[in-house]
Amino acid sequence: MLSPSNLINDTFDVLVAGAGVTGICAALAAARQGARTVLLEPRPFIGGNAATGLCIHTYKTRYGKQVVYGLAQEIVDRLVEQGGAVGHVPLPSGYVHSVTPVDADLFRMETTAMLAEAGVTILYNTALVDADAQGGHVRRVLVCSKSKLGYIQARSFVDATGDADLAVMAGAPARTGWPGSGAMQPVSMMMRAVSVDTRRACEALSEFEAAWATKRGVDGPFPVYFHGTFTRWNQELRDLGVYDHDNHQFWTNTVWPDQLNINGSRLANIDGNDPLALSRATVELTAQLQKLAAFMRARVPGFEHASFMPNAFVGVRETRNVQGLYELNEEDIRVGARFDDAIGQGCFPVDIHHPDGKSQEHIDVGGDGAYDIPYRCLVPQKTENVWVAGRCISVSQYAHGATRNMAPCMTTGEAAGIAAALCAKTGTAAAGLPMATLQPALREAGVFLETQAATA
């Protein structure tokens, strides 16, 4: 029996739980404010969904105005220099103005370097077990590593777990799944294909005009994003046991002329909070993608010599959302709402994969194509020194379809990290942080442009 003691005999200013894109931005932002910061990650690598090959959606409104900046843009700029990104590429026919593909491994490597430069302590293979909280004030968290069960103390805590794990442990109320039913959007697993002729693959598969880009060292433009359905192969894919429904949609992206990241799997009725369900999903989705890979190699031009690698973990779209001081809702997205306590903006449309796993819908953001994200959505009820960021912020089931994507997650992560650092320095409770303190810090960090800050 392990007897817990302090894992690290020190108190950090800011502890961030979860090292996906949200937690990376939170930890970087806190450390750049001068806070001693520790970042916990249960996996042996950082990056979350960006390390699976997903695009970072999206930086520009449907009218072409960029509204996402700060660390989200800095990371892309650094990746462009490393050959791991091609910038924001217009998508001539699609549900967004532009797409931002990144290389999964270079994203992981570059953000690891950035965290090291900022002085962040990263604890890999370290799972959150519980929070030591009294009256909503968290003093320390209990974590488990390979051979140690121990406590880590901090002054401020940022929950970037995606599932609101830390906030719920601290006593915050949360909604799980869709109101009433508790149903959750289906889970998926990305797959990388190498030795692909992407130009021929695009010609064979794309049902809409693709996004093309150029890159240093590559001869001519190549497709970096295209999507469509497998409609023409409905019966064949059913017979092979790949899908149990017709007209399955897929999306592909890349920053290389001979590789593709394929988002073409889906599994319904999985509770992303349940490790047994996620383990089952890993087995079933891996098998689904192996069948899809064999089909594509045999039947789809451009993949004749390809090798396919299903991702190592399942991508989860929805589990919990905390109940915060404000809940961003459907009407806010439909009108492109503005708030006095804005900490940044989002512009990705509502993207809901229905829990049956067979359909989805996209609904555009209203107004000028962007909506403000209020600081109050980052502050859970019944807590004092906890912030949430990323997928689990305080939003309705409808609004979650917009805010769950990586660009807004990075924005809320950076804001939560800055807020946590400022409050750790002054001893201020999360709910008491003045916007006259936070918003200038966000502006200085580059999250706001002056024109955006004027509306905040």
Image (cartoon, grey):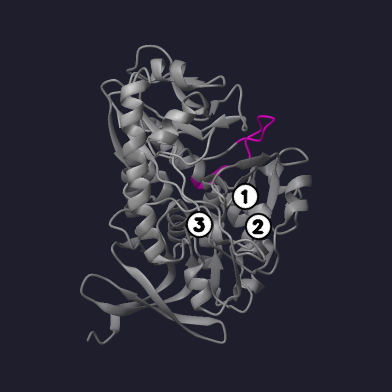
Q: CA distance from mark 2 to mark 1?
A: 7 Å
Q: Nearer the viewer, residue 69 or 31?
A: 69
* Residue 287, image x, y percentages: 33, 44
Q: Amino acid at mark 2?
A: Gln
Q: Are marks 3 and 2 in contact (CB under 8 Å)?
A: no
Label 2 residue SS: helix
Q: Which residue is mark 3?
A: 269
Decide: few, some or many residues near mark 2? Use Cα within 10 Å; few <14, some 14-19, many ≥20.
many
* Label 1 or label 3, whichever comes before in sequence order: 3
Decide: few, some or many residues near mark 3? Use Cα within 10 Å; few <14, some 14-19, many ≥20.
some
Residue 82 visible to the viewer: yes
Residue displayed at 70% across by 63% down: 327
Which corner quadrant of the image does residue 24 belong to?
bottom left
Queried whether the magenta region covers residue 5, the answer comes back as: no
Q: CA distance from mark 3 to mark 2?
A: 17 Å
Q: Which residue is mark 2?
A: 397
Which corner quadrant of the image does residue 6 belong to?
bottom left
Magenta residues, dominant SS class: loop
Decide: few, some or many residues near mark 1? Use Cα within 10 Å; few <14, some 14-19, many ≥20.
many
Number of labelled discs? 3
Residue displayed at 36% across by 58% down: 280
Residue 348 visible to the viewer: no
Q: Are marks 2 and 1 in contact (CB under 8 Å)?
A: yes
Q: Quadrant of the N terminus?
A: bottom left
Q: Which residue is mark 1?
A: 401
Residue displayed at 32% across by 41% down: 310
Q: Nearer the viewer, residue 245 or 261?
A: 245
Q: CA distance from mark 1 to mark 3?
A: 18 Å
Q: Which residues are magenta?
A: 60-71
